[in-house]
Image: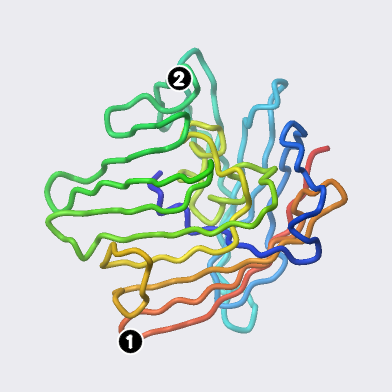
Amino acid sequence: FLLSALLIFACSSGGDSDSDDNANNPNAQRLVESVLVISANDSATFNYWFSYDENNRLSTMQCQFNDYNEFGQIFDEGIIEVYNIEYSDNAISFGWNDEEVSSTYLLNNDGTIDANYITFLNGYLNTIEFGDGQDDNCLQQCTWVNNNLTQIVETCSPNFSDSDIEEFEYTNHINPIGYYGWTLTGSGVAAMPYLVGAMGKPSELLPNKIRSCRGNTYSPINQNNCNNFSETEITYEFDSQGYPIVINENSYWQSVNYERFSSTSYAITYTN
């Protein structure tokens, strides 16, 4: 569940202005029922469906991978995979495709993962260490400003070329859906710990731009200094309560001898 799962939504408000009286009431709570692709162009996407228990905790997540060509047609259609979540005192377990348990995490009192490779600061993700101890060992460091994630720096050794940096910008629109708009272009396994709060609190605002650079960690990002560069921007459409119901994502990708553009539109539905 590395932070590379955060290849996600950037946005600038479309349809509603950032100053609207939206879900600027963070106490209002609606549960996301599905995040489904409306259209996509030259893009790898996921469809998601969610179910909840009697305490409104996420209990089941279904996801389906689809790959679209430049003509907006699916050329690789995946099966629907099912992930189950079990809660217990100070622990959480995830199962996959009817497996009883595929992974279990001990939890701190605030519901975040209790492990020596991950740290939190005031409930927000701070650092993650990972690696196989042979080829690469990496450290991800998160920077938060005014309760919003602004930067992730991943430093790897001995292969510094595997290092990267991500930078985030934000609208003034309160984020009413937590990580449900942040991690869902990652795989199901990567998304689940975020969705249940085990990876800490999400940003307070909806992001408006995400830029990433692989092979360098200098800030601000200069795409000319990157082995691989990407930039994503998204526009939102909101309902009358300020919840996003459509997310339109536009991305640009560049490497040494390659560049491409992709676009995806997602529809979000709610249980209530």
Kind of residue at badge 2 = Ala
Residue 142 in picture, x, y percent from top left: 38, 46
**Residue 122 lies in what quarter of the image?**
top left
**Residue 117 lies in what quarter of the image?**
top left
Disc on res. 97: none
Give the residue displayed 34% in from the left and 63% down from the top. Answer: 219
Kind of residue at badge 1 = Asn
Residue 107 in picture, x, y percent from top left: 43, 21
Residue corresponding to mark 2: 91
| Residue 234 vertical placement versus 91 (above, below) | below
Q: State which quarter of the image contains the N terminus.
A: top left
Secondary structure of the residue carrying numbered label 2: strand
Mark 1 closeness class: few <14, some 14–19, many ≥20 residues within 10 Å? few
Residue corresponding to mark 1: 257
Asked if the residue at tag 2 contacts the one at tag 1, i.e. Cβ–Cβ closer than 8 Å, the answer is no
Q: State left or right for residue 160 relative to residue 104.
A: left
Residue 225 in picture, x, y percent from top left: 29, 76
Task: Find the residue positioned furthest to the right.
Answer: 240
Mark 2 closeness class: few <14, some 14–19, many ≥20 residues within 10 Å? some
Give the residue displayed 80% in from the left and 65% down from the top. Answer: 15
Give the residue displayed 83% in from the left and 37% down from the top. Answer: 272
Q: How is the image coloured?
A: rainbow
Give the residue displayed 69% in from the left and 66% down from the top. Answer: 235
| Residue 89 vertical placement versus 24 (above, below) | above
Compare residues 179 and 149 and report the one nearer the observer.
149
Secondary structure of the residue carrying numbered label 1: loop
Q: State left or right for residue 20 relative to residue 13.
A: right
CA distance separating discs 1 and 2: 46 Å
